[in-house]
Amino acid sequence: MKFVPMILAATLFAGAAQADEIVVHMLNRSDAGAMVFEPDFIVANIGDTVRFVPTDRSHNAETIEGFLPEGVEMVLGAMNEEMVLEITAEGLYGIRCKPHFGMGMVALISVGEPTNLEAIEDVSLPRKAQEHFDALLAEL
């Protein structure tokens, strides 16, 4: 009977997952082209953090209004500063670099089921950003 507490503890902690930190670089150029997030398609889990690092200057990372799961607050990163996004809900998170948004500098974070897929279809985006998101959404 002295093994019961150990078995109970092992059972309780067996399903506990460790949260990850995912690093995304903000770049002027990569193999994918100019003004990019690398990677630009991120699969994350609730509890993870996504750290956007301004590897090259003149970038920021911020969430896109209306392109977030319900209940998730906007995050506005400062120019040339890291931005850390805590993943708190299932759905799709749209990220942009404000100065290069019109050039299509966007990233997509997918968490579980795309619960807000219909809602993001109503978000108005610059043409190149929309084209980039369409390509990223095709990866779902």
Image (cartoon, rainbow, N blue to C red):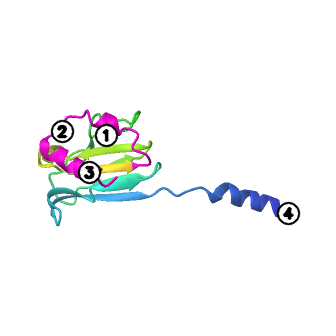
Mark 2 or 4, closer to the camera: 2
Q: At 76% from the left edge and 62% from the top edge, which residue is drawn? A: 6
Report the amino acid beneath label 4: Lys
Where does label 2 land, which residue? 125
Instruction: State left or right for residue 63 relative to residue 116.
Output: left
Residue at the limit of the structure toward the front, as seen here: 138
Where does label 3 land, which residue? 107
Report the amino acid beneath label 1: Val
Where does label 1 land, which residue? 75
User: Could you tell me which secondary element the residue under label 4 belongs to?
Assistant: loop
Q: Residue 98's x, y, as percent?
A: 18, 43
Which of the two residues, 138 or 70, is positioned nearer the viewer here? 138
Report the amino acid beneath label 3: Ala
Mark 2 or 3, closer to the camera: 2
Q: Residue 8's x, y, as percent?
A: 75, 57
Where does label 4 land, which residue? 2
Which of the two residues, 81 or 2, is positioned nearer the viewer here? 2
Mark 1 or 3, closer to the camera: 3
Report the amino acid beneath label 2: Leu
Q: Badge 3: few (under 14), some or many (20 or more) residues near its Cα, within 10 Å?
A: many
Q: Residue 30's x, y, as percent?
A: 17, 64
Distance between mark 1 and mark 2 Cα atoms = 18 Å
Q: Are marks 2 and 3 in contact (CB under 8 Å)?
A: no
Vertical placement of residue 71 versus 136, above or below:
above
User: Could you tell me which secondary element the residue under label 2 belongs to?
Assistant: loop
Instruction: State left or right for residue 17 relative to residue 61.
Output: right
Q: Residue 17's x, y, as percent?
A: 55, 57
